[in-house]
Image (tube, rainbow, N blue to C red):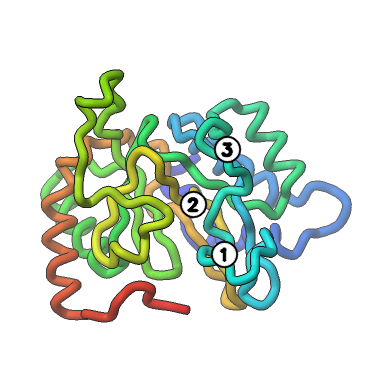
Amino acid sequence: MSAEFGGRRSLTGRLTQWLRGRGPERPAAEDGREALLLAAARAGLPLAPAAHPAPGYRCSCDRVGCPTPARHPISFAWQTQSTTDRAQIERWARHQPQANFITATGMVHDVLDVPLEAGREALERLLAEGIDVGPVAESDDGRMLFFTLTRGTPEDEDEWWPCELDCHPETMAEHPGLRWHCRGSYVLVPPARLPGDAGESVHWLRGPEHPLPDPLTLLEPLTDACARHATQDPTPWPLRH
């Protein structure tokens, strides 16, 4: 499997076939979706099923006014349900062919989640400086996700390092710049579909075969880029409705 999983164009094609559903046999795109999910699990990212888009910018959960359509887990027990077990992920993927998947952060990995333009600027700088960058995903709703090692899960709760950058699913609107997803949070893992008619998705720019870096090695370039982005574009989150 290549570093880019065949590139975004290839992935988009597979997702298009998946959405169309080509009859009673398992579509080739479904195999591609499953392969991407299993690759994430092999990299140690714990996965759990998530909601998916429904017609009319709605969420499959049918909650009236769902605040995060197609972006949240199906089960309230997602933290204990999340797993890297291949057989379980295959069962979920095959029995819930439309489901997105989330990965629970703060167990093995964290995610530094930044505005798209800031992320592109920071990624260019990081690569130019020869800094090890791990998996990176891009979301068509205007965010870029940098996957890193977690800051740790100490047995002694008093040793837990609190951080004002911590972002939880219910507080995302309060973090228009950099969001640090750690313990108690999650993000969509590629391939994932977003609501709308434009075929928007969450897709890998750098796949999960890249080793997870220490988050502190990425933090300065990301915060610098976010600060410049905020100055140039003060539009509050969310950027789209």
Question: Which three-letter amino acid code belongs to the residue tagged 1?
Answer: Pro
User: Where is mark 2, residue-wise?
Assistant: 188
Residue reaching furthest front? 158
Question: Which three-letter amino acid code belongs to the residue tagged 2?
Answer: Leu
Q: Earlier in the sequence, mark 1 or mark 3?
A: 1
Q: Is 106 in front, or is 35? A: 106
Please indicate whether residue 223 sits to the left or right of residue 29 in the image: left
User: What is the C-alpha distance between the residues marked 2 and 3?
Assistant: 16 Å
- In the figure, 72 relative to 67: above or below? above
Q: Is 116 in front, or is 14? A: 116
- Residue 130 position by quadrant: top left
Can you see residue 33? Answer: no
Seen at 44% across and 32% down, the residue is 43
User: Where is mark 3, residue-wise?
Assistant: 77
Question: Which three-letter amino acid code belongs to the residue tagged 3?
Answer: Ala
Q: Earlier in the sequence, mark 1 or mark 2?
A: 1
Seen at 23% across and 30% down, the residue is 160
Seen at 28% across and 67% down, the residue is 176
User: Where is mark 1, residue-wise?
Assistant: 69
Please indicate whether residue 98 sits to the left or right of residue 57 in the image: right
Q: Earlier in the sequence, mark 2 or mark 3?
A: 3
Q: Does dot 3 land on a helix, a strand or a loop?
A: loop
- In the figure, 36 relative to 228: above or below? above
Q: Are marks 2 and 3 in contact (CB under 8 Å)?
A: no
